[in-house]
Image (spheres, grey):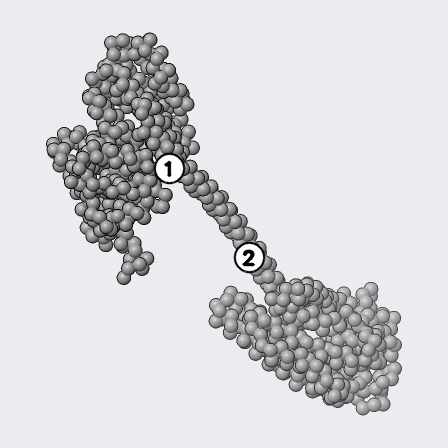
């Protein structure tokens, strides 16, 4: 036994001890058998007449009898411990046998793993626990014959599937059952669970990637996972109704598809694709089975080994390419994926060494699980990325929709403003047209009357009509007038008219008034003031007139006071009829204001015009 | 003796204006016209001292005649005689070089007085026109005017304009500033002149911008 094997044995014991502290005392009672008498023969009993040789266990046929395909008989003898004849059942534990075995105790068949001729039952991964019936156990020396059927290395793709028999252990069943169940869990249950997970996840991702063509790497990863899970599907079936050659052919061919899927996944995940690769990989998938068929079942291992090297090189190249692009892109994927890939590579290395050495320490079993577990982890990561991208896309979409809504609202608002503006422009233009028409037509005719009428009274009436018309036109075209500007206009008119009539005028008004008058209020106030001025010039006989303007709590007040004769009741009636004292009042009322006339013979006249400014502003709107 | 152009399309008003002008200038030589086209021909043929120009005419605007007169007879005084009292109509005529305006519907006495004043170099200026002129010059004080010939109002001229805008009469302003009536009238004349010069410069600049002149 080499030092390495010894070391691994010790390691295994320690690990087991750590795993199950209670197992340690039982070990002492277990008989470990590491050599056996072996002979080739296909009978129902150990071929005593054939040449026998003593072989060390574990015995791999590749090493001990290369080219032979069995069946091979192994004989071991052991001394039944006297203390163990009581209630406890003894058992034989075979950790690994490939492919199948039958166990004979003292010449009696006590166990069969399944079919012993083609198609053989495959028990390569299934540990065997064989109960040794107490009735058959002799006191003293007992003989156990084990018939093993298997395949030569040349017929199988992997060393792990060529004929072999592991160490044997004999001891109380209770002591071996723990070992058996542990091994079963490790070899069968865990890979089955992981395989099933991988199959489900892989199918899901394949569908996801297939639907979403821009995420084709998902489809390839799904295919990879499903392919890997399928190669492990063997664990579910002991016996297949087809020959070993067919099964091995299918398993080896599957590797070509797994290689295609993993290489494409790595490249697509790095966002890179090439037409040549897209074409060559499927070609390889067709070429590999073809070479296997051409070589025949006898040379399967040799041909498959060559292909394995090619596949490994392809996957390593794709992985390096992927990692390089991620490193350059400083992607966070780099660290995750590089650790995953290193783990897978390490596991592959451990498995390779274990296969070569023929030993299968615990670490080799664990290594077998690493790759599918890593696939599950990477798969989850991919789904997470996909989900996050989907979420981002949703968010982006929502954001975009919001922006579109905002833009639409903005456009609608602008359109409304534009429409309003247009209506305003059209209205303004129409007003100006009407104003111009009035001026040019009605104005010109009234003017002709003013200057050609023989009657002074008709001239005056026409002039007044003309003035009315102009004020109305101004009201039509009118924008709001600043109160300060209005006062300027009124002052210029009133003061110069009074001055021409030889009446002294005092004008009192505050400076810098920020308020505005609507065009209507301006026009009406102008008429009232003009009327008042005319009355003073024509009827009052005053020598002095004062005009006072005030802005008081939203009211605009204009007080016109003269020192004339005043208006007697009798004259008042006449004035009202002929000179529009009533129309002054009426106009003020239209503006929600009032016009008060205080007068008495000899006291002069005071006209108080009050217009609420805020309502004047309202009227403009 | 004065050579006077009378442009008015309504025959009655034209006859009335003619009578009025003859009252103020008894020995005047009056050329009458009812169309812009005829008036422009007259301006090219006869030298005028004074032109009374209506704005709204059947074949165009009197402003064109004002412009023509300003171009070929700069010493002739154009006076706008109009029914439009609003600055919207008057301002373009003043920019074109009109030297004051008379509102047609005013009583005869007032018009004769204004004619006399204008002929003596004392043009009328209403508060709304004054405000318009102020706005025009203050807008021109902005950057694009920097390339224009230096035409801006003096402080005194601005002061007069401001007071007119507030409704003070020219004699009142004279008293307030301690200046004679004639000096104030000179300021007003100067304002009209600057308005015209500046407007013309601006128009030339605009034409240059549009590529009408090289």
Q: Closest to the observer: A167 or A498?
A: A498
The quadrant in which residue B175 appears is top left
Name the N-terminal-most of marks 1 and 2.
2
Is B123 or A357 nearer to us in this picture?
Answer: B123
Identify the residue position indicated by label 2 in the image.
A392
Q: Where does the image place residue A68, in percent across and percent down from the top left?
A: 77, 88
> Is B83 on the left-hand or right-hand side of A141?
left
Residue A440 image label: 1
**How many C-alpha atoms fall within 10 Å of the one at disc 2: few (<14), some, or many (≥20)?**
few
The total number of labels drawn is 2
Q: Position of residue B131 (x, y in %)?
A: 27, 37
Query: Between marks 1 and 2, how big is the CA–CA gap?
Result: 70 Å
Q: Name the quadrant containing residue B22.
A: top left
Which chain hosts label 1?
A
**Regarding mark 1 in the picture, which secondary structure is present there?**
helix
Q: Is residue A65 above or below residue A407?
A: below
For the question of whether residue A511 can be seen, the reply is no
Tell me the element at label 2.
helix
Q: In the image, what residue occupies the spot 74% across and 78% down?
A: A250
Q: Chain of mark 2?
A: A
């Amino acid at each position: 036994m080499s030092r390495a094997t010894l070391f691994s044995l010790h390691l295994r014991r320690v690990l087991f001890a750590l795993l199950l502290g209670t197992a340690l005392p039982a070990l002492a009672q277990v008989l470990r058998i590491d050599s056996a008498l072996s002979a080739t023969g296909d009978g129902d009993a150990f071929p005593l007449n054939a040449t026998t040789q003593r072989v060390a266990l574990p015995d791999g046929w590749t090493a001990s009898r290369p080219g032979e395909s069995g069946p091979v008989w192994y004989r071991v003898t052991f001394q039944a411990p006297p203390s163990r004849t009581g209630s406890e059942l003894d058992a034989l534990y075979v950790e690994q046998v490939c492919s199948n075995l039958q166990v004979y105790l003292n010449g009696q068949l006590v166990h069969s793993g399944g079919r012993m001729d083609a198609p053989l039952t495959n028990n390569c991964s299934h540990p065997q626990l064989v109960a040794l019936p107490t009735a058959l156990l002799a006191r003293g020396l007992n003989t156990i014959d084990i018939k093993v059927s298997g395949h030569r290395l040349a017929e199988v793709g992997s060393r792990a599937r060529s004929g072999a028999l592991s160490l044997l252990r004999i001891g109380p069943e209770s002591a071996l059952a723990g070992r058996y169940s542990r091994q079963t869990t490790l070899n069968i249950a865990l890979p089955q669970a992981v395989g099933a997970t991988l199959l489900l996840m892989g199918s899901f991702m394949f569908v996801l990637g297939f639907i979403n063509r821009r995420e084709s790497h998902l489809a390839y990863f799904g295919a990879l996972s499903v392919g890997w899970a399928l190669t492990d599907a063997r664990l579910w079936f002991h016996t297949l109704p087809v020959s070993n050659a067919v099964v091995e052919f299918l398993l080896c061919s599957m590797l070509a598809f797994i290689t295609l899927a993993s290489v494409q996944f790595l490249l697509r995940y790095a966002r890179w694709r090439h037409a040549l690769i897209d074409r060559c990989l499927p070609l390889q998938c067709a070429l590999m089975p073809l070479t296997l068929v051409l070589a025949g079942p006898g040379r399967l291992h040799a041909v498959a080994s060559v292909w394995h090297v090619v596949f490994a090189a392809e996957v390593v190249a794709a992985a390096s390419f992927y990692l390089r692009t991620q490193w350059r892109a400083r992607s966070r994927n780099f660290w995750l994926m590089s650790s995953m890939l290193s783990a897978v590579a390490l596991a592959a290395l451990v498995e390779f060494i274990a296969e070569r050495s023929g030993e299968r320490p615990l670490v080799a079993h664990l290594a077998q699980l690493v790759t599918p577990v890593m696939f599950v982890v990477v798969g989850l990561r991919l789904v997470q990325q996909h989900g996050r991208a989907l979420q981002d896309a949703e968010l982006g979409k929502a954001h975009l929709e919001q922006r579109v809504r905002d833009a639409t609202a903005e456009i609608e608002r602008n359109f409304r403003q534009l429409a309003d503006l247009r209506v305003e422009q059209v209205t303004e233009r129409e007003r100006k047209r009407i104003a111009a028409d009035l001026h040019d037509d009605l104005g010109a005719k009234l003017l002709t009357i003013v200057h050609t009428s023989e009657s002074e009274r008709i001239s005056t009436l026409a002039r007044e009509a003309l003035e009315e018309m102009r004020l109305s036109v101004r009201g039509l075209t009118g924008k709001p007038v600043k109160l300060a500007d209005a006062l300027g206009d009124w002052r210029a008119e009133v003061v110069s008219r009074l001055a021409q009539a030889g009446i002294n005028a005092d004008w009192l008004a505050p400076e810098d008034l920020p308020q505005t008058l609507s065009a209507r209020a301006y026009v009406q106030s102008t008429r009232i003031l003009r009327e008042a001025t005319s009355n003073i010039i024509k009827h009052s006989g005053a020598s002095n007139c004062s005009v006072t303007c005030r802005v008081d709590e939203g009211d605009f007040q204009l007080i016109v006071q003269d020192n004339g004769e005043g208006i007697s009741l009798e004259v008042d009636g006449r004035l009202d009829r002929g000179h529009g004292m009533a129309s002054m009042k009426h106009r003020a009322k239209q503006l929600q204001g009032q016009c008060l006339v205080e007068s008495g013979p000899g006291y002069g006249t005071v006209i108080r015009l009050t217009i609420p400014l805020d309502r004047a502003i309202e009227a403009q709107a | 003796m004065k050579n006077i152009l009378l442009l008015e399309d309504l025959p009655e008003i034209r006859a009335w204006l003619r009578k009025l002008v003859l009252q103020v200038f008894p020995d005047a030589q009056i050329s009458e016209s009812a169309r812009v086209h005829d008036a422009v021909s007259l301006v090219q043929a006869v030298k005028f001292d004074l032109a009374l120009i209506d704005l709204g005419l059947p074949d165009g605007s009197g402003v064109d005649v004002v412009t023509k007169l300003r171009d070929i007879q700069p010493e002739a005084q154009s006076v706008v005689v109009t029914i439009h009292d609003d600055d919207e109509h008057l301002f373009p005529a003043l920019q074109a070089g009109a030297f004051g305006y008379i509102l047609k519907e005013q009583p005869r006495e007032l018009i004769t007085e204004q004619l006399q004043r204008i002929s003596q170099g004392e043009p009328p200026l209403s508060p709304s026109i004054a405000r318009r002129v102020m706005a025009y010059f203050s807008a021109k004080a902005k950057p694009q005017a920097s390339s224009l010939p230096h035409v801006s109002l003096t402080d005194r001229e601005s002061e007069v304009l401001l007071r007119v805008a507030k409704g003070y009469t020219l004699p009142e302003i004279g008293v307030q500033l301690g200046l004679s009536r004639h000096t104030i009238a000179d300021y007003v004349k100067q304002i009209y002149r600057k308005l015209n010069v500046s407007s013309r410069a601006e128009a030339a600049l605009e034409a240059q911008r549009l590529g009408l002149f090289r």
